[in-house]
Image: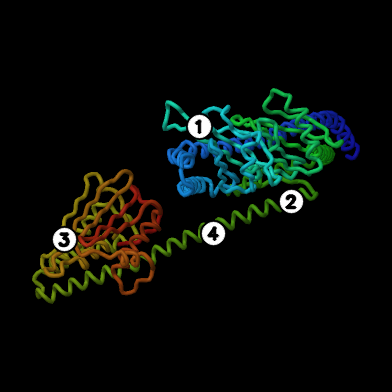
Amino acid sequence: MKSFRMKMICILLGVSLVPLIVATVYSYNISSRNLYEKINLATMSSIEMLAKSIDNELQRLTADMEIVTSSREFQHAMNQIRTSRTDGDRWVALQDMDEMMIGMFGKSKGVSGIYITTPDGITYAIQDKYHTDLKAFARSSWFIGKDIGFSSIVSRGIEPMQDGRYALIFGKLIRDVTDLGNLAEIGSVHFAIDPALFSSVMIQNKEDSALFLLNNDGQVVVSQCQEEESDNFYRLIKDNIMQRKETSGVIPVTANENKMVMIYDTSPLYRYQTVRFIPFSIYNSEIKNITWITILFALFCVIIVVLVSVLISKNISKPVNILSKAMQYTEKGNFDIQLDCNRKDELGDMTRSFNRMVRQLDTFFRQIIENEKAKKNLEIRSLQYQISPHFLYNLLASVRSLAVIEKAKETSEMLSAVSKLLKNTVGYAGMLIPLYQEAENVRRLLYIQNVCHNGLIKWDLELQKGTEEFLVPNLIMQPIVENAVFYSADMNTGKVEINISIRKEKERLEIIIQDHGVGISEERQKEIFRERNHKGQFTHVGLFNTRERIRLNYGEPYDLMLYSNSKGTKVVITLPLLLEEEEIVLAPG
């Protein structure tokens, strides 16, 4: 046995290790390459989204600038500032301009200065955060002059302000559009944008070494890196990106003897460039993870090969498989199985224990089934004897009342009807009877009740042709009919009207008993079917127990349903279509 197992181990190791090593190396190379591509794609995607966000922010700002500077109110205010003859008039015009600009840009975090200049040298600043010297303002190299022409908002680049900070300058030459024939120059307007506006958009990842935003002139708008390394990174950008025609790309670079990957993208609208520097160590750390995973996977596979070679043998696997299949068979509720076993080892003990367990389970479940059947039959018998005493009591009380009233003249006829009714009900207790016989019992019952009520009961019973031979539980309709007689009488006249319809509905037998009384409230309906114990409440016994008989005998979907309103009550009984009596104990009528 040991020699055979050692040979199996050697053969399996020799066959498995060579392809395993090849597969491991191949998987390592594929995983590494996919990792590079995945990281680059993810980073490029984030750079593209960042570039689009920059475009959206600039587009929003320039759109707001165009809206304000192209409005009639702005043109009017510029003309008022230019043509005012007194300082008071000019002050009013400047206040109007101030309110207009603050109303548009007062809550904007980006606009940090608005500067308005007229051709005659009047310069006015609104929400200026740079403390600009307005006299030197028009002498700036980026000041918009007549050479700009009449177009739209233009970018003048990143410029140093007088307090040492930098601002992104946008400007526009304003001409009088009210005089289209002349289009005279009436001034210029400049907007200073704080580059910090883009800092909220330029979110640096923790693995980034640096993050830059450059305008279309190659000027740095925002930089996020260590200050002493800023020039070195910017030099790499100038040497590797600004000379390229591609608008996006991934470039390996070296900064301070550290290998990095420079990833850049250009915004499609304003041509702003976003540049990220990612250390190559990020890639290496992921490669290390793949390396360790590959090594562990290879070791795991070797261990599995060794274990499988040791464990696989016919002497062990065959009886285990047989026992496993037998267990799966018994899990489905099949206990008619016994395994042959002549083994004297532990597997033999397990098989014999399994056989004993199956026999015990089979006996146990059979006993449970028998107990449930007995319990169900006892419950049905109990319900049967709850209904019968009420029915017999009402019949005898009716006969006694009639005998007292009529002094026995019509008693013989009524007693004859009662005798036949009792013969067909008590005599067939716990049995299924033909539907025509049950209908005849109901007719006799209504005849007796009509005599007792001095002819005040009006009723009709419609039995669909072809349904007469279907079998129904004895006394299935009597409790419902009695309820209708006793509880639907008119309060003033004592009249009772009952309609009974019996028909085949699809694959069911449907019995509808309807009266025209005052109905049953929703709360009382819930109470009727809530509890089993309804002592002294005949209505509850009749409806509740009849429903229980149907449910216990037939189960879903057969039932007794109650519908009631102020115009009457309708009881619908659904039963299966039976032509031969089944082996079931039924509650007699």
Q: Alpha-carbon neighbours of circle 3 within 10 Å: few (<14), some, or many (≥20)?
A: some
456, above or below 29, in the image: below
**Residue lying at 89% horizontally and 33% vertically, measured from the top left:** 10
Dot 1 lies on which element? strand
Q: Are marks 1 and 2 in contact (CB under 8 Å)?
A: no
Callout 1, which amino acid?
Glu
What is the x, y in percent for residue 28? 80, 32
- The residue at which mark 4 appears reads as 368
Callout 4, which amino acid?
Ile
Q: Quadrant of residue 17?
A: top right
**Residue lying at 21% horizontally and 56% vertically, measured from the top left:** 440
Q: Is residue 313 visible?
A: no
**Residue lying at 21% horizontally and 45% vertically, measured from the top left:** 465
- The residue at which mark 3 appears reads as 497
Q: Is residue 266 left or right of residue 65?
A: right
Callout 3, which amino acid?
Glu
Residue lying farthest to the top in this orientation = 245
Q: From the image, state whether disc 3 or disc 2 is nearer to you.
A: 3
**Residue lying at 73% horizontally and 43% vertically, measured from the top left:** 224
Which of pointers 4 and 1 lies earlier in the amino acid sequence? 1
- Closer to the camera in the image, 131 or 80: 80
